[in-house]
Image (spheres, rainbow, N blue to C red):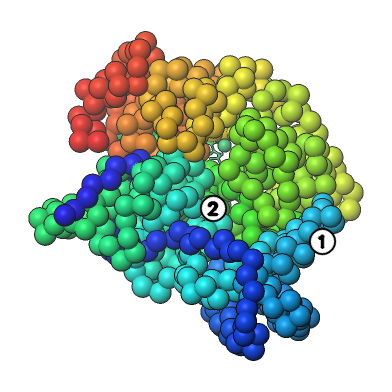
């Protein structure tokens, strides 16, 4: 019997493949003694051998997929495991106290972790603690004979099914094998969903119960267009979805012809459609999909999976690569935006009940100049190599922007005095994603070079609906007149000062929003590369003059549903959306 699960369509396309459950097994253990100490020591040694092999395999995969830095993270684990003192300690506990190998491992791990806890606030030790926990989990899994979820161990084409996936997990996925993703939790604009779009995979999030309904190896159809997952499909369903997948592929081919074209509406207005990127690997996808620049470089991925903050030089080399890879085109780099659902292992953020409303993004940057300043210096140095622009995330008040900009100017002066090359003009803008800033856009406009509307956060704050919470996803309405009125306000305020406005939230890639955004005068769209050609194609069919009455009526509408119907009335090609 097939089973239908519904969720939120987070990244489009259709995948048909067996399920691979990425769910942790229960590794809880009780204190137990052994009657056969030799046997216990032998089991322990076996688990060390198996864990070493496993980690070496993971290291090799990480190296292939993500390069040397990612592989180095696994080295820490190997170092801990191969430290002879660890094995000696464990054996002593088994021989001296007649503990089972599992219990000896637990006692020792707890001991190390308590030591680390007391040495808090040291980034190195914290990452070490994470590595110790990981080694412990792996040893235990071999002792207990249970499989650990590990995105790196996938060696065949499969659809990953997980409760939740962190951006760090996503970064480890091997594109050759991951055919699609299904999660229990998450909203369409959680950072995980956004990152998986960069992988161009069909993704359905927020199914609530996928991990309890799907078994490892079950054949699945993931319909990332409509947010459906079919478990153990019938022949008829398979046939239907194979046809749909073919149609999707054909459509993509038609859009492919626009790869090297500019984005121009039917009435001749030019727009820029750029890519959102997070890693150097994404650049290739941006080029393949005809990006006209990078509208959002999420720099936080440089900080994730690291054991310490990246140095100014390390950052500079990476930013330089982005800028040179894009040639003449603009690269808008956003300063570090962590907090919310983006956490760093090496930098422990305080626990907060509402992290999205808490210590996040520029708030951290301003409070911790030792993080912001080296990043700004690295960015300024990279600006000498191409069209780099810098923007600050989560600006809520003009004072925050002024403060951030003053720090930037200060670093620029210092570099100038030291004779370091910096571009003559570097555009400096801000993300428009906090409602207070959108309402006051006219107060910011004279001082910025551009705005980039972060619709993901703007909408979550506007509707007070957590972007990662599928229970309140119904409130997350990109087409709602409340959103449109704010967007219009921002565009008008910027244009009154002769500044340009972009949008880099997910709304920029929503075809139903495109006619409204183009007709309201948005200058730049930035999105996951997989959507660029589709939006370029759509814009080429739009006549902005004819769409002005649509804007007028949409702004006066009462609901997102009403706006959607109006869009479909004015733009018939969108009726199938
Ligand atoms: C946004 O909020 O719309 C945005 C682009 O930033 P992020 O999704 O990284 O918070
Ligand atoms: Mg944001």
| 459 to 428, vertically: above or below | above
| 356 to 346, vertically: above or below | above
| 303 to 576, vertically: above or below | below
Name the secondary structure under disc 2. helix
Check disc 2 and report the residue beneath it: 167
How packed is label 1: few (under 14 Cα within 10 Å), some, or many (20 or more)? few
Name the secondary structure under disc 1. helix
Residue 33: x %, y % from top left? 64, 74
In the rendered structure, the answer to whether residue 319 lies left or right of residue 487 reads: right
Quarter where residue 352 is shown:
top right
- At horizontal 48% and vertical 74% (from top left) the residue drawn is 145
Label number found at residue 115: 1
| Mark 2 and mark 1: Cα distance apart in space | 29 Å
In the rendered structure, the answer to whether residue 390 lies left or right of residue 6 reads: right
Residue 443: x %, y % from top left? 66, 17
In the rendered structure, the answer to whether residue 173 lies left or right of residue 575 reads: right
Residue 573: x %, y % from top left? 21, 34
The picture quadrant for ligand 1 comes to top right
Q: In the rendered structure, which disc, 2 or 1, sits on the residue that comes first in sequence?
A: 1
């Amino acid at each position: 019997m097939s089973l239908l699960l519904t969720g939120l369509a987070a990244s489009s396309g259709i995948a048909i493949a067996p399920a691979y459950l990425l769910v942790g097994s229960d590794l809880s253990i009780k204190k137990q003694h052994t009657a056969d100490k030799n046997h216990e020591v032998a089991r322990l040694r076996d688990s060390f051998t198996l864990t070493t092999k496993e980690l070496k395999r993971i290291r090799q995969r990480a190296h292939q997929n993500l390069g040397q830095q990612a592989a180095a993270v696994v080295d820490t684990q190997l170092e801990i495991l191969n430290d002879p003192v660890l094995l000696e300690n464990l054996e002593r506990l088994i021989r001296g106290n007649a503990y089972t190998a599992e219990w000896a491992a637990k006692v020792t791990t707890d001991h190390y972790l308590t030591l680390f806890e007391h040495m808090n606030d040291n980034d190195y030790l914290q990452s070490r603690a994470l590595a110790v926990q990981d080694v412990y989990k792996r040893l235990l899994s071999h002792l207990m004979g249970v499989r650990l979820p590990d995105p790196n161990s996938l060696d065949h084409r499969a659809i990953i099914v997980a409760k939740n996936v962190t951006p760090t997990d996503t970064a480890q996925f091997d594109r050759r094998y991951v055919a699609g993703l299904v999660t229990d939790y998450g909203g369409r604009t959680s950072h995980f969903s956004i990152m998986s779009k960069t992988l161009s995979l069909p993704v359905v999030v927020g199914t609530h119960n996928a991990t309890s309904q799907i078994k490892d190896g079950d054949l699945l159809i993931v319909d990332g267009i409509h947010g459906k997952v079919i478990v153990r499909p019938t022949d008829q369903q398979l046939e239907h979805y194979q046809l749909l997948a073919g149609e999707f592929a054909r459509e993509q081919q038609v859009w492919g012809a626009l790869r090297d074209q500019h984005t121009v509406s039917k009435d001749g207005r030019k727009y820029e459609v750029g890519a959102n990127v997070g890693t150097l690997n994404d650049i290739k996808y941006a080029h393949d999909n005809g990006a006209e620049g990078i509208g959002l470089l999420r720099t936080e991925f440089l900080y994730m999976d690291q054991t310490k903050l990246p140095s100014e030089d390390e950052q500079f080399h990476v930013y330089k690569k982005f800028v040179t890879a894009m040639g003449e085109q603009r690269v808008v780099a956003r300063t570090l935006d962590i907090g919310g659902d983006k956490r760093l292992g090496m930098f422990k953020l305080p626990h907060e009940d509402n992290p999205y409303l808490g210590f996040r993004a520029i708030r951290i940057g301003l409070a911790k100049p030792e993080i912001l300043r080296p990043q700004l210096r690295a960015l300024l140095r990279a600006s000498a190599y191409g069209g780099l622009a810098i923007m600050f995330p989560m600006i809520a008040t003009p004072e925050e922007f002024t403060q951030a900009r003053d720090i930037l100017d200060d670093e620029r002066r210092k570099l100038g005095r030291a004779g370091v090359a910096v571009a003559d003009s570097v555009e400096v803008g801000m993300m428009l994603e906090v409602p207070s800033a959108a309402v006051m856009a006219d107060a910011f406009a004279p001082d910025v070079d551009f705005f980039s509307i972060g619709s993901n956060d703007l909408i979550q704050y506007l509707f007070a609906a957590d972007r990662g919470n599928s229970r309140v996803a119904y409130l997350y309405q990109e087409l709602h007149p409340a959103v449109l009125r704010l967007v219009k306000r921002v565009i008008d305020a910027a244009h009154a000062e002769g500044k340009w406005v972009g949008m880099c939230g997910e709304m920029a890639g929503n075809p139903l929003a495109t006619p409204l955004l183009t007709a309201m005068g948005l200058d730049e769209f930035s999105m996951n590369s997989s959507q660029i050609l589709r939006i370029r194609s759509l814009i080429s069919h739009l006549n902005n003059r004819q769409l002005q009455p649509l804007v007028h009526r949409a702004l006066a509408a009462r609901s997102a549903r009403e706006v959607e119907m109006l869009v479909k009335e004015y733009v018939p090609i969108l009726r199938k959306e």
